Image: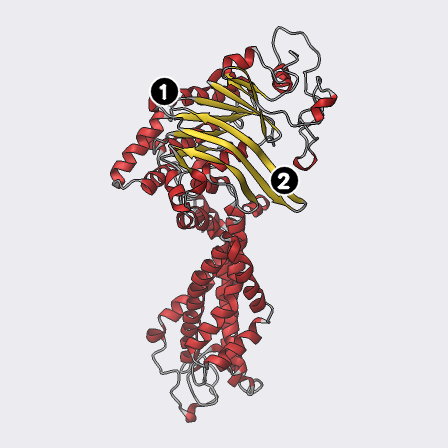
Amino acid sequence: MSLLEVDSLTTAFQTGSGQVTAVEDISFTLNKGEILGIVGESGSGKSVTALAIMGLLPKPPAKILGGQIRFDGQNLLSLPDRAMQRLRGPGIAMVFQEPMTSLNPVFTIGDQIIETIRAHENVSPRESFARAVEMLARVGIPSPDKRMSDYPHQLSGGQRQRVMLAIALVCRPKVLIADEPTTALDVTIQAQILDLLMDLRDELGMAIMLITHNMGVIAETADRVMVMYAGRVVEQADVGTLFDQPRHPYTRGLLSCVPTLDQDQDRLIAIPGSLPEPARRPPGCRFSSRCPLAVAACSEAMPLLESVTPGHAAACIRIKEGV
Amino acid sequence: MSGGSVSNPTLRRLLHHRLFMLGCVLFGIVLVVAALAPVIAPVDPNKLAMRFKFRPPSQEFIFGTDNFGRSLWSRVIWGAQLSMIIGASVVVINAIAGTAIGAAAGYFARLDNMLMRVNDALMAFPAVLLAIAVTAVLGPSVNDVIIALAIVYTPRTARIVRSSVIVLREMEYVQAARAAGAGHWRILRRHILPNAMAPLIVQLSFLFAYAVLTEATLSFLGVGAVPPTPTWGNIMAEGRQYMTDAPWIITIPGAALMITVLGLNLLGDGLRDVLDPRLRVQQ
């Protein structure tokens, strides 16, 4: 049994112009010690999936229409609020995209780490202080005992993201959801944070769900990848297969967008068009309006995720034709 | 005033703010006088001495006497004490009730409509009119005036707290705290309210001034604490009839009221200048 299983999850938002589905029929599993990368454009439903797992979707306007989220065998969607609250932190923890605003400006970082420990465990102030210092050291903050009394504005963006990681990891979560943890950071810091994530995964044996729109980040860190488009999973494979033999035209498009050094090109490659608004998705395959390989049949029925080879699935009707 | 050696940057900016310091001095004088009332004004403010009536300020009677020969020095100083007690009580009640109502309305969307509509209804009345209505129901004692003023001004505080909470509720660190397993109570207490303090503190300093001023208005109109209670409003109401013959009776408590309100407003303006980051650039 996998640590985290999401089974045909569908969520919707109530908007002024009616109900709009944000993610539809999402299924995936996450095993202990595994890093699952979730890629997709902004608005493809990555963050909504993460928040649904955390039980942090604002309801209303959000609504879960169907599916199950099983963590350690229990369905999180039917868990009472209190139990869910206890699970956040020691069970599943999350780090957010914006390290600059994810820390409370009026408390020291030490306070904020200690607070998290003491919210979940009955430990003495002295012990929680020691654990906070230890965690700061582990996420690579130099002279952690001195940094404990620093306020967030005294730290750089990379250091704040490390502090966020320390807060997320201090209760030793089994699953860490990292929602674009490196997007707001510059490239060298990005690499350090990713290395740190992988080290911590090895050290603590936790599973990581890494949400990003950066293919490079996925290639470096993930074990398996799930590509999302307009609220649906379009392709799922282990990282090597996905990069060597992408089957879905969208995945191929994403990969060809990554500029390479050995190609001499004036313009960067882009997928034409933009992500359709949830209310104006084309009928049938949602990518059909932008797909270079689309045929008439594409807009007739929604293509289902079908396995191409064991462990590799894609949702495109033209795969069978060998395109 | 030099604040060069102070390390806290907010405190340092406050110490360099001249008008804030002036406000502190003015309000400080009133506070000290009020606190020392039994020492510096040992004469009973209600002691009648008809043979001394309408004495102008002199060495014997520093502020003169009123139409009953009562020492105006004693009456104004004891009046200051009452004003400070009323102002401080209203501020404390207001801070607690306004924060509780505002935080509940801002944080729990379900309560918002109900609480804020009651709030709006209370705010729709002019402050003095509402205060008169409440004292008419409760009675004309100092305690009832405090309750009336608290009822009148709590909706404003609640609205200010609510608007801060609505903004803070959506902050990423609140989301992050939630993701780390913090409950509603902890989020409100640790992550939202401490960050909502700055506008509240500014509001409370102005509120102190409003409370003192409205209390004087109520007494002046005869619906506050009953005479002969030495409130500034009462003294002024009695002095009004003798304005041409004994102008000191109405002008001295009037000046005291002005100094208090001016001091509090300067203090509040200074706090706002320093605590509101949007105004910082202009300094």
Q: Nearer the viewer, residue B52 or A240?
A: A240
Residue indicated by mark 2: A20
Q: Is residue A207 above or below residue A321?
A: below
Q: Quadrant of the image for the C terminus of chain A?
A: top right
Residue A90 appears anywhere in the view: yes
Q: Is residue B98 left or right of residue A319?
A: left
Residue at horizontal 57 percent and vertical 34 percent from the top: A23
| Residue, far bottom | B51
Residue at horizontal 54 percent and vertical 30 percent from the top: A26
As helix, strand or loop, the secondary structure at mark 2 comes to: strand
Q: Earlier in the sequence, mark 1 or mark 2?
A: 2
The label shown at residue A302 is none
1 or 2: mark nearer the eye: 2
Report the amino acid beneath label 2. Val
Image spot of residue A46 (x, y percent):
55, 30
Residue B224 appears anywhere in the view: no
Please report, as a chain letter, where disc 2 is located.
A
Q: Disc 1 and disc 2: Cα gap in Å?
A: 39 Å
Image spot of residue A308 (x, y percent):
56, 15
Q: Quadrant of the image for the N terminus of chain A?
A: top left
Q: Identify the coloring.
A: secondary structure
- Quadrant of the rendered image containing residue A196: top left
Report the amino acid beneath label 1. Asp
Q: Nearer the viewer, residue A12 or A210?
A: A12
Q: Is residue A227 above or below residue B283?
A: above
Mark 1 Cα-neighbour bin, 10 Å: few <14, some 14–19, many ≥20: few
Image spot of residue B60 (x, y percent):
40, 83
Mark 2 Cα-neighbour bin, 10 Å: few <14, some 14–19, many ≥20: some
Residue at horizontal 42 percent and vertical 86 percent from the top: B70
As helix, strand or loop, the secondary structure at mark 1 comes to: helix
The label shown at residue A202 is 1
